[in-house]
Amino acid sequence: MAFPIFDGHVIGLISYNLSIRTPNSKEKNGVSTAADDVNSDIIPSASMLKQLAIGVETTKIVKSMKDLMILARDNSPVKERSGLSLYAMKSFVVGEKEDKFAAEFGRDEKVMSFIHLIMDPEGHLSRRKTRSRMDKAPKVTKFSKEVHGAPPESFVPELAEAMGSVKTLKKMALFWSRVVMELRRLWCEGKHIPGIPTDEIPNLNSCLLHQQLQVINCCISRKQRRAIATASLDSVLKQANNIAELSHPPTDLLPESTHVYARISSGKFVLRLGADKQLENTTLLDTGEPVYTPVMQEWPLLTEDIIKETEEFVLRTGSVGAGCSQLLSDMQAFKAANPGSILEDFVRWHSPPDWTETNDESKQVNGGDISPSRGHLSTRMQKEGNLWRELWQTAKPIPAIRQAPLYYEDLSVEGILNGLENISPSSLFEQLFVSLLSSGCAIAEARVSSNEFLYKVFKECKDYIVLICQSKNWVEKANDICQVYETMAVMALDPERVIKIMNAQPDQTHTKEDPNKLRKTPSKNQKDNPTAAQSSTMFSKKPAKPIFC
């Protein structure tokens, strides 16, 4: 059986003959509660996805999550705000639990489980049994990139699942404020966010929220590395002081202290600062001393919004950006780690293509030792006014740990946390929606990929979702996406029964209530737009909106 990009008849047939709702399931505010709770242990339920879709739709005019909390409250906003601030102070100073939060969410298992997970970062995300079956092949993980979501089994899909289980906007806003508060606590305590890589640059294929959480974890790792580098530098200085206090000259200890001292062309010994490790078979051209790679300042961490701002700034001002500052910083660190070095030494290490090496074995130094390799710089490096030459002349031997920072971790993370406190609700719910969607689809795909026939239909559904999510107005079709996802979840939960339905003859599948009757007669606009008409005929039922209290 061959299908177009999306076969509405096949999906309508499955939806009509099979539903994941059990006969005894009840609905509250238009969301299934019984069977969904059971099946959510296997795959995120469609009801959670629908709840997030409702959040996107109903909060478009609300500017921030703080405003949403105020609008959704019955009590005085000033009184509530002061109460929350008082708790925040207690949480940081005394470490008390939030009684109000526990009272609001004590029965919401997913919410409380997620909060406990953040409070105990050593824990593991998602205890869902079927996660161990997740296929790590690119065909599964690629989906999150295509819809710009978050990687499966990461922090954001777990957050989305917990948020999707909340039934009112008031509780959603309260839950989010608690999440941000716990993220701030982790940052202050120097603990990594669980479910987020501890030291990876932001993945621009993921949603902005995932990128920002990656920045927080990276900044924590960088601060830890800086503490180690500071301790190492202090150790070198202490060792140098101990050597200086000895009665013998430093030359007597050279074999044991070459990583501490370097001999310059005048014959004097100068202290190395900020050296990381020695480069094999590489020596300075003028002095013959071994070359050490320096500890350098790390590049700024850029998320997609910061990259856009930087590009706009460069176009507006003509600035070269941070590249020049980074190059100068590297030169200063190299000079500190390699006293007596020249520009050619730096270029050999930092930009090998700009150095052409030639061996001259006729020259000897140091009582018969072969001189280091010689060569010449590239044409661009030899040009008058070359930026590298100008920067090298101004660079001073300063270890990276003593330089002015190129990137302020504290300011960056504080800006992110403040931004998360004031994030637009619709923006937050959109990111959570696509992240939960991609996570659920990855789990479902791992379960149906072994059946070639079923996987073909599943792939048509997935391709349809990707096509919609990559459009600018995908939010308007969020309900359609939920309906298709629900069908995909059915395939994952009961594949054998779906196959029976797919293989059944038309006269056997069409009962008194023909599923084709569910299709509405296309309107005039729908006739002019076949894609819109197809979507409308397949999905007619809209989920109920959540209440604000």
Image: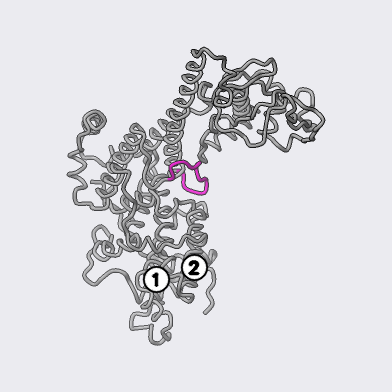
Binning the other alpha carbons within 10 Å of mark 2 as few (below 14), some (14 to 19) or many (20 upward) gives: some
- Asked if residue 480 shows in the view, the reply is no
Q: CA distance from mark 2 to mark 1?
A: 11 Å
Residue at mark 2: 459
Element assignment for label 1: helix
Q: Main secondary structure of the magenta part?
A: loop
Give percent across and percent down for residue 198: 43, 42
Residue under the image location 26 percent in, 50 percent down: 113
Q: Position of residue 363 (x, y in %)?
A: 80, 28
Work out whether 464 lies above or below 381: below
Residue 336 lies left or right of residue 303; in this view the side is right
- Checking the image for residue 491, the label placed there is 1
Determine which quarter of the picture holds residue 102: top left
Residue at the image position 31 percent from the left and 69 percent from the top = 20
Label 2–label 1 contact, CB within 8 A: no
Q: Which residues are magenta?
A: 197-208
Q: Reply above or below: 279 against 123.
A: above
Q: Report whether 294 appears left or right of 173.
A: right
Disc with the residue nearer the chain's start (2 vs 1): 2
Where in the figure is residue 440, as x and y percent of width and height?
39, 60
Residue type, mark 2 in image: Lys
Badge 1 crowding class, 10 Å Cα cut-off, few under 14, some 14 to 19, many 20 or more, is many
Which residue is at a point 47% across and 55% down the rendered structure image? Answer: 144
Task: Name which quarter of the figure residue 19 lies in.
Answer: bottom left
514 falls in the magenta region: no
